[in-house]
Image (spheres, rainbow, N blue to C red):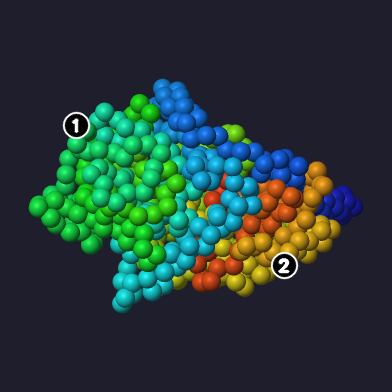
């Protein structure tokens, strides 16, 4: 009897110890799963704002050199390109502009880009008709001026290949380039592509399946014509064609492209657009089984000499990424929607209803990943709660007046580093992405003014912009319906 009592006491003690150990482990996990605070290198960030971008011919050399070396390891259906931000490819008028000027120009483009997306979603067409392929092309075609031309790659067009700078856009379903004869073209860095000098250029007939997929296609002299316009007067008009595109040493035949003979827009050097959206007319959609519906990009961080990358094929899908399911919106088939459950500041989840970020049955709301939008937007109630949580944990930092679309700014002049609370995205299903400090507290001039790089949305739509994506490998596995974050950085 005594032995039984002793054994019972021992078991009770063991259970208590296990419970205490589990509680301690849970508490530890809650506080150490990711850091509550991190350091921001103010001095380095300010120094980067004063660095001048290289001349355009230096980037010609850069791309020509690196595209070949990267392509040596390519396999069929897998190829990789260098990727740079537009601020590194200046026009003659913008070379030497201050960081503050470039920042304000970027915010103006960004505001127009977002306004354009909202118009497409909410009343952009009479009768509330759904998106069409060319609708998204128009966002980009009105492009640099509309904020869609933020990142560039260099590819070859035609046979023999003529190297051209192309804007990438994850929210567009058109591959488009300026063409001779050009009755109206904006200035670009390279000679305008002349299809008469390409052995692989083939016009598209009005009865082709390519023409059928263009909702507002026209027919002239038996050839399929397209026209993409935007409310601000920017547009591209021309003929559809099948053409060869070259990525390093990889040649891709019979890609449906728009050959623009009449174009208007402030494109700052780019010859056209490489659409990466979710629709069938995007480059990714056209490649289908050749790339397995997979691509990955790493947007280079501002103020660094490094380049980012754009990679196609199953080899672009990394092991060890944080995977989140893609959500399809029939009203916006070009866009990549993801499930967002909440936001965190300093290791604490902000009390925001998950419904705030949900996509409803009518296609309203939701969260879009977009390379063409710079600043992440959240619906106003979510943004206010998020911002106030950040303010509450940064009372030690000297405030500054708001700048442009940012209402939460700090005067960090003279600081070398500062300690700031972490910012985290809580995705549906449990994954958490914690951003580096440089992705949410950014310099807006070269005098030490930094701002909280988020803004309120004027609708229920949330957009995760490219500032928050910088330096993080983002991978799209369209065949299986997932987007991944990490594990690599650039």
Instruction: Label 2, secondary structure: give it.
Output: helix
Badge count: 2
One can see residue 275 in this view: yes
Q: Disc 1 versus disc 2: distance between alpha carbons?
A: 60 Å
Q: Nearer the viewer, residue 429 or 485?
A: 485
Image point (9%, 53%), residue name: 221
Circle 2 is placed at which residue position? Answer: 388
Q: Residues within 10 Å of mark 1 (few under 14, many from 20)?
A: few
Residue at the extreme front: 93
Coordinates of residue 11 in the picture (x, y in percent): 81, 52
Residue at the extreme left: 221
**Residue 378's quadrant in the figure?**
bottom right
- Point out which mark residue 469 bears: none
- Viewport quadrant of the C terminus: top right
- Residue 461 left/right relative to 155: right
Circle 1 is placed at which residue position? Answer: 199
One can see residue 282 in this view: no
- Residue 336 left/right relative to 35: left
Coordinates of residue 246 in the picture (x, y in percent): 32, 32
Instruction: Relative to 167, say whether 460 is above or below.
Output: below
Whichever of labels 1 and 2 marks the residue nearer the N terminus, that label is 1
- Viewport quadrant of the N terminus: bottom right
Image point (57%, 38%), residue name: 53
Q: Dots 1 and 2: beta carbons under 8 Å?
A: no
Q: Nearer the viewer, residue 374 or 354?
A: 374
Image point (62%, 62%), residue name: 404
Instruction: Relative to 51, say whether 381 is above or below.
Output: below
């Amino acid at each position: 009897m005594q032995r039984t009592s002793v054994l019972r006491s021992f078991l009770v003690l063991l259970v208590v110890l296990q419970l205490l150990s589990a509680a301690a482990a849970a508490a530890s996990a809650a506080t150490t799963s990711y850091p509550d605070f991190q350091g921001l290198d103010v001095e380095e960030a300010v120094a980067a704002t004063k660095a001048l971008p290289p001349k355009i011919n230096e980037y010609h050399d850069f791309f020509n050199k690196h595209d070949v070396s990267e392509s040596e390891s390519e396999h069929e259906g897998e190829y990789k390109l260098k990727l740079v931000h537009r601020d590194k490819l200046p026009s003659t008028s913008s070379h030497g502009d201050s960081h503050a000027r470039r920042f304000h120009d970027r915010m103006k483009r960004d505001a127009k880009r977002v306004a354009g997306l909202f118009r497409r979603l909410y009343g952009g067409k009479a009768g509330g008709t759904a998106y069409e392929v060319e609708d998204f092309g128009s966002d980009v075609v009105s492009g640099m001026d509309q904020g869609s031309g933020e990142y560039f790659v260099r590819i070859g067009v035609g046979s023999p290949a003529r190297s051209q700078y192309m804007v990438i856009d994850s929210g567009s379903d058109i591959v488009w380039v300026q063409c001779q004869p050009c009755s109206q073209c904006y200035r670009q860095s390279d000679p305008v592509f002349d299809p008469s000098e390409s052995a692989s250029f083939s016009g598209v007939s009005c009865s082709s399946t390519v023409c059928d997929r263009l909702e507002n296609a026209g027919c002239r002299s038996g050839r399929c014509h397209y026209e993409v316009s935007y409310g601000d007067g920017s547009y591209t008009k021309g003929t559809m064609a099948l053409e060869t595109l070259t990525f390093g040493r990889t040649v891709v035949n019979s890609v449906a492209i728009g050959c623009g003979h009449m174009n208007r827009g402030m494109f700052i050097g780019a010859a056209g657009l490489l659409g990466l959206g979710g629709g069938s007319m995007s480059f990714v959609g056209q490649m289908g089984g050749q790339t397995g519906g997979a691509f990955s990009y790493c947007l280079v961080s501002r103020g660094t000499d490094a380049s980012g990358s754009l990679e196609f094929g199953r080899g672009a899908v990394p092991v060890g990424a944080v995977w989140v399911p893609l959500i399809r919106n029939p009203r916006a088939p070009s866009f990549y929607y993801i499930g967002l459950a909440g936001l965190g500041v300093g290791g604490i989840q902000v009390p925001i209803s998950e419904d705030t970020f949900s996509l409803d049955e009518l296609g309203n709301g939701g969260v879009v990943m977009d390379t063409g939008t710079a600043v992440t937007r959240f619906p106003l109630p979510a943004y206010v709660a998020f911002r106030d949580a950040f303010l509450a944990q940064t009372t030690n930092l000297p405030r500054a007046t708001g700048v442009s679309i940012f209402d939460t700014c700090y005067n960090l002049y003279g600081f070398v580093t500062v300690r700031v609370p972490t910012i985290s995205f809580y995705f549906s299903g449990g994954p958490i992405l914690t951003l580096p400090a440089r992705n949410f507290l950014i310099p807006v001039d070269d005098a030490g003014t930094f701002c909280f790089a988020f803004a309120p949305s004027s609708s229920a739509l949330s957009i995760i912009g490219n500032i928050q994506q910088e330096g993080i490998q983002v991978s799209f596995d369209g065949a299986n319906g997932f987007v991944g974050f990490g594990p690599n950085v650039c």
